[in-house]
Structures are given as C-alpha cells and as structure tokens.
C-alpha cells in the first residue's frame, strides 16, 4: 500500500472504540534500496487518536522485523529509512502498512515498488489495487516532483499548476474505490476503502454487509460509523450557530485544571476562539489577536478553545506565544467543536453580554477585527 497519495484521500473523522486484550503482530521484510542500516517506524491507531509510538528498527542485509502491539483495532505503521548523520528523516518517503491484530505481514521490494503479503486482506487488496495502481504511481511521482520543486524554491503557483492534474487523478482513484465497494460490499478491503472515499463515505457506508461489520476490520467499521454520526451532529449544530441564537453553554477544564463554564462569563462580550497549535493560520493571527485583546480587554474576554492538541502541546503553545486571555482545552467530553458545528480553524464566535451570538468568522479574516472596531467604537 503506497504512501504520499494516501494523504490526499480524504478520510472520515474517526473515534476510538474499544479496550480489549492487547497482542503482538509481527511485520517482517526485506528492502533492497536502503542505504541506511536503520528504519524508523511510526505506529498509531487507524483512528489517528491515541499515542503514536516512535521506534527504530535495525536493518541487516535489508532485512527487518517490527513488532506491533495492538488489540482489535488495526494500526498503521509508517516505515521510513533513517537518514545518515544528523539529517532529518524524509517524511515524504515512507511505506504505510495497515496491521490487522494477530495477522503477521511481509514487506518485500523497494521503497518505491514493494509488495505487502501475508493475510487475506492484502491478498484481496493487492488484486483490487491493480485497478488504480497506474494512477497511484503517477500521483506519487508527481507528488515527489512537486516537493523537489518546492525545495528548489520554485514559486507556489508553478508548483500548483504542475500538480493540478494529480488532483484529477486522485478523484479518479476515489471513483474506482467507490465502484469496488459497490461490487464487493462484503469484503474487508471495502471497509478500508470506505474510510478513504471522502465525500462519498455517506453514500457507500450503508452498502457494507453484516459480514464485514463483524470481521477483522469490525473496529474500523465502528469508527467510521461513529465518525459519520459525529459529522451529522456537527452539521445539525452548525444550523443553530447563527447570529441572534443562544450560544450553547459548556464547561471545560482551563489551563490550571479548573472547571470554566461559558455562562460564568456573562455580562461582557466574549470571543470564542477555536484554534490549535498545529493550525498555521491560527498562529499567524496571534499578533492581531493580542493587539485587539489589549485594545478592548475592558469590554470583552477571549476564551481560547484548543482543539486536536495534546495537553502538553496546548500548554507549550500558550506559553510560547504568551497568550494573555482565558484558555480551555476541548478534550471531547463534551466535544465543543461539534456543539458549535466547527468546520475550519480558526473560527471566532462573538457572544454578547446576554449570551447571544452576534458574529461568526471562519478563518483568519480582517472582517473579524473590523467587526470589533465597529462594535466597540
């Protein structure tokens, strides 16, 4: 299963589902084109939630063994060659392996042309992949070339123009995935492909049969199901987050571990700032946010709601950027990003002293600051 293209196939928002007994699953392999004597493995649940394990693996004559500890929930293992000296690992060049608990696998070939074998899932997947492998190879090659163009300092417009045909190829690949699911709704491969069909996931998910609901990828099936329900709840909530509506109350832990309720801030204007340390536009907007907080802090409060960060990264970002306003972290219980129907980051929602929504601004938009100037003039 190939690498760079996987990042382009939009997946479903996933939630972790179970806590059964853990077991070890072994990946063995031989790679012929690795100059290094060491591999780096990143191991994480298919839900992309939970701990990511970083491991270093010895290579002897191109041979390696990786042990993955997991339960009923499959894991991804991304395999990178370790760069010589102190050079950073090239994160664009990797082999991605889907590990089904208790089903050992073998990887053979090269980084660019390899085969994964060892269980029924991969036997079926390798056969199915023939239907889109040519497209996948072309997209991977174009991805690599686009990255090299960026490294050479070629303009972003030129890179985007070069890469535009690849996006059409990705769309064609997704179409082929959808067609495969329609024709094979009782195969585990179809569960995996469903998680990568982007906007079509709601269309193809109901086609999956009871056989796969209870098969080796049952946990992945459940996470897709929960993700779809969460997305539906988000869309329903978004209809209610409009100017003049009552702002839903919530209570989250603040940066000192104490409960902070939105309703406790009644009596002044409040800006809910949905952000994350990983969000480039959120970080880019911090200087203006700090400027306007200082300008109007007697008339308004900002409540930063950190999303999709670990507690450590959240606190480090608040400290690094010296953010002087109130902070809470959205840990998912309740999931305030769903409660407010958040679709993009940053999102800023202005609430008046009576708890009514007066403005919603998605993205780092000058319109937000113009609104504050008009509001407090």
Image: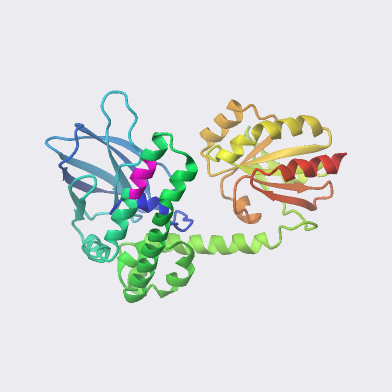
Rendered-image quadrant of the C terminus: top right
- In percent of width and height, residue 360 lies at 72, 51
Query: Which residue is found at the position 41% from the left and 49% from the top?
Result: 162
Rendered-image quadrant of the N terminus: bottom left
- In percent of width and height, residue 164 lies at 44, 54
Nearest the eye: 255 or 152: 152
Q: Is residue 167 above or below residue 36?
A: below
Query: Which residue is found at the position 52% from the left and 34% from the top?
Result: 313
Quadrant position of residue 197? bottom left
- In percent of width and height, residue 132 lies at 30, 63
Query: Which residue is found at the position 76% from the left and 47% from the top?
Result: 350
**Is residue 232 toward the left or the right of residue 85 in the image?**
right
**How many numbered discs, if any?**
0
Does the magenta run of residues contain 107? no
Q: Is residue 136 above or below residue 69?
A: below
**Is residue 374 toward the left or the right of residue 153 in the image?**
right
**Is residue 351 toward the left or the right of residue 347 in the image?**
right
Query: Which residue is found at the position 66% from the left and 36% from the top?
Result: 327
**Is residue 66 toward the left or the right of residue 355 in the image?**
left
Which segment did they paint magenta?
Answer: 142-147
Nearest the eye: 285 or 100: 285
């Amino acid at each position: 299963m190939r690498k760079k293209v996987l990042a382009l196939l939009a997946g479903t928002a996933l939630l972790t589902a179970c806590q059964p007994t853990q077991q070890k699953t072994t990946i063995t392999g031989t790679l012929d084109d690795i100059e290094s004597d060491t591999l780096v493995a990143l191991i994480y649940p298919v839900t992309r939630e939970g701990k990511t394990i970083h491991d270093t693996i010895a290579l002897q004559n191109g041979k390696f063994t990786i042990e993955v500890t997991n339960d009923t929930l499959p894991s991804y293992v991304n395999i990178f060659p370790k760069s010589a000296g102190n050079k950073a690992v090239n994160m664009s060049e990797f082999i991605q392996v889907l590990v089904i608990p208790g089903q050992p696998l073998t990887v053979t070939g090269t980084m660019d042309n390899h085969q994964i074998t060892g269980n029924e899932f991969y036997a079926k997947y390798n056969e199915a992949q023939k239907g889109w492998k040519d497209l996948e190879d072309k997209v991977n090659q174009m991805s690599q070339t686009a990255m090299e163009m960026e490294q050479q300092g070629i303009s972003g417009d030129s890179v985007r123009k070069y890469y535009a045909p690849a996006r059409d190829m990705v769309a064609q690949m997704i179409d082929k995935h959808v067609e495969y699911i329609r024709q094979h709704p009782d195969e585990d491969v179809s569960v995996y492909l469903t998680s990568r069909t982007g906007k079509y996931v709601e269309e193809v998910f109901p086609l999956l049969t009871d056989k796969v609901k209870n098969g080796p990828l049952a946990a992945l099936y459940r996470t897709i199901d929960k993700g779809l329900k969460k997305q539906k709840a988000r869309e329903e909530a978004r209809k209610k987050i409009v100017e003049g509506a009552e702002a839903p109350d919530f209570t989250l832990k603040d940066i000192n571990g104490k409960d902070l309720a939105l309703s406790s801030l009644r009596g002044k204007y409040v800006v809910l700032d949905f952000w994350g340390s990983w969000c480039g536009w959120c970080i880019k907007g911090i200087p203006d946010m700090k400027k306007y907080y200082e300008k109007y802090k007697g008339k308004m409060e900002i409540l930063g709601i950190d999303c999709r960060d670990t507690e450590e990264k959240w606190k480090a970002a608040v400290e690094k950027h010296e953010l002087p306003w109130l902070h809470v972290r959205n840990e998912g219980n309740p999931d305030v990003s769903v409660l407010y129907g958040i679709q993009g980051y940053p999102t800023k929602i202005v609430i008046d002293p009576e708890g009514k929504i007066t403005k919603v601004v998605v993205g780092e938009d000058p319109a937000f600051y113009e609104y504050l100037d008009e509001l407090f003039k």
